[in-house]
Image (cartoon, rainbow, N blue to C red):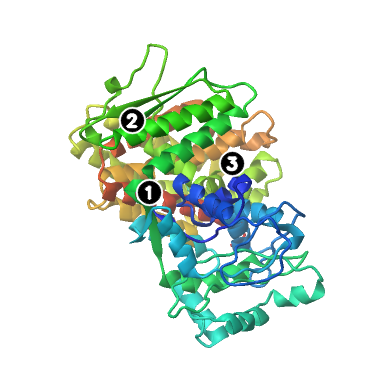
Amino acid sequence: MSNDVLLSFVGGFPDKRSVCNNVCESFYGVAIDGCYRLLNNYGNEFERPDTGRKTEEVDDVTVLKNGVEGNLCLATCMKRNCVSREIVESVYFAEGIRNMVAAEGEERRVRYVKFDVWRAFFVRYGMEEVELSMSSLYQASTRFHPCMESFDDYLSELNESFNGRCYNLSGDKIKDLKRLMPGNRIMRESSTTYASSYLPMVAPRSNESSIISVKGSGRKSADYHSFMKHSLPVYKRSLKAFRVQKRSIDLAIRAQCISLMQALAIRENPPIERLKITAIGTTLRTKMEQTGKRLSCFAQALNIPFSFNTIMATHLKDINQDMFDITEDETVAKITVTETWLRKHRHLYDGATRHPFICSIRDGNIDISAFKTWLGQDYIFVRAFVPFVASVLTKAYKGSDDGNGDVEVILGGVAALHDEISWFKKEAFKWGVQLSSIVPQKANQEYCRFLESLISPEVEYKVAAVAFWAIETIYQESFAHCLEDDSKTPPELKETCQRWGNESFGQYCNSLRNIVDRQLEKASDDVITKAEATLLRVLEHEVDFWNMSHGRT
Ligand SMILES: Cc1ncc(CNC=O)c(N)n1
């Protein structure tokens, strides 16, 4: 799986780990633990006791502080009721924005940091610069689509505003840029100036200072959007990632174990009796053992019962469960591919399963006309879903290694769709929705087209199976949410929610998930990457579909 880390935002003290995590994750979704560690080290490394300093020099870093609540405003390009803005804020940036603003407060200042400094920093911590993988590029491109059609729109807009000077801004030019910022308007009204620490990706042509920062807006706005708008084209030019090199693995192991131990230590009821860490390696036994010793000390300090063990293997693929020293009452925690993805893309996933449309059902204030729109549109979708599921079935059968009953599970899905179509007809009649006259809306058309593209024999079974699992699971989780004890779902909508939110549909989704995880365990990196990108596209189509039903696009 890809370990790429897109660099964007850095800043913070070690105690602001969550700030870095959230910002990083919600902006680019591809951050890995190793990256958080480095981000936090960064803050630590340059920590200044005097946070009240006023200079704005190159090479400076921002200190995030606890402080007043802020409120981000994207009004410069998106109106408050604009649905795109809502998506940007809620799906992509909510956590990051909230944390970033809440953590900054009155002392916010603009800071500039040269890209080279930043790059040197990463190199120093054992990172190497690499080209982005397909999945990261994909990620990067999806981050911005809600507000702009394409990178190129951004680019041309920016060139227009700044006469094409955007890529190579020196100190004075940055000042120009700040003057031109729409956020400036708000700034003049307010005597408070916030500082921000945006360290977007920049590939400078010269050694001029070339980080673009945004001076935003006091109490009303941190003008986050301006930042995105002006950093994005730069970002496009220098899409690069940093990957952890071998020699920093020891560091990575330690940092992760330490976070785990810290998390365990602050629990009131420690969920485990003993933490057993097994390091597996093909080389560097002494190094691993040293790491173990340090970890033991740390665990002792935190009062966590701990043991450390090392396993040497010739090849990582030779590792199996028997090599672990496991007693009968112990289990080996294995993180599956789907679990990793769902953690990594939590924001987007929650955006799809906790959409305002679903929440309005759950809260009992759904607009019935929106429900009817959804009903009619979903009928069309489900009809298109049938041939897709049939194609997954065919691929499962042809996959020929089906000793695990994939075909039966998928066949169950096909059979249920027969029922489902009858249900849609009945339900439409009940609500006075004329199915024969429904025209698919844009989001629906696009989703159906996407399904058709997945039918192609060129799309691997493993990739198609991921889409299938995700499509079913999003509905399951969304509607199950409307059936929870504290929900106020109107009685006349309960049956709809039951259809996907019931327990046996949940079990079926679990079977699909097991299929996917089993299939991906033996998949190539390339297929895993494609499958992950497919999952993201499903999530986005689902969000679009809810938006369409909600009637606000
Ligand atoms: C847009 C959408 N996504 C998922 C489902 C659930 N799968 C089949 O019914 C659905 N009906 N509609």
Residue 85 is left or right of residue 105, and the answer is: left
What residue is disc 3 on? Answer: 430
x%, y% of residue 510? 42, 30
Residue 145 visible in the current orientation: no
Say if disc 1 is inside 8 Å of ligand 1: no
- Which badge, 2 or 3, is on the more N-terminal residue? 2
Amino acid beneath label 2? Val
Residue 172 is left or right of residue 35, and the answer is: right
Secondary structure, mark 3, is: helix
The image quarter containing residue 119 is bottom left
> What residue is at 26 percent from the left and 53 percent from the top?
456
Report how many numbered discs are placed on residues in the image: 3
3D distance between C-alphas at marks 2 and 3: 31 Å
Circle on res. 63: none
3D distance between C-alphas at marks 1 and 3: 39 Å
Residue 293 visible in the current orientation: yes
The image quarter containing residue 264 is top right
Residue 405 is left or right of residue 217, and the answer is: left
x%, y% of residue 75? 68, 69
What residue is disc 1 on? Answer: 532
Q: Quadrant of the C terminus?
A: bottom right
Mark 1 vs mark 2: in front: 1
x%, y% of residue 440? 47, 58
Pick the front one: 504 or 135: 135
Pick the front one: 194 or 138: 194
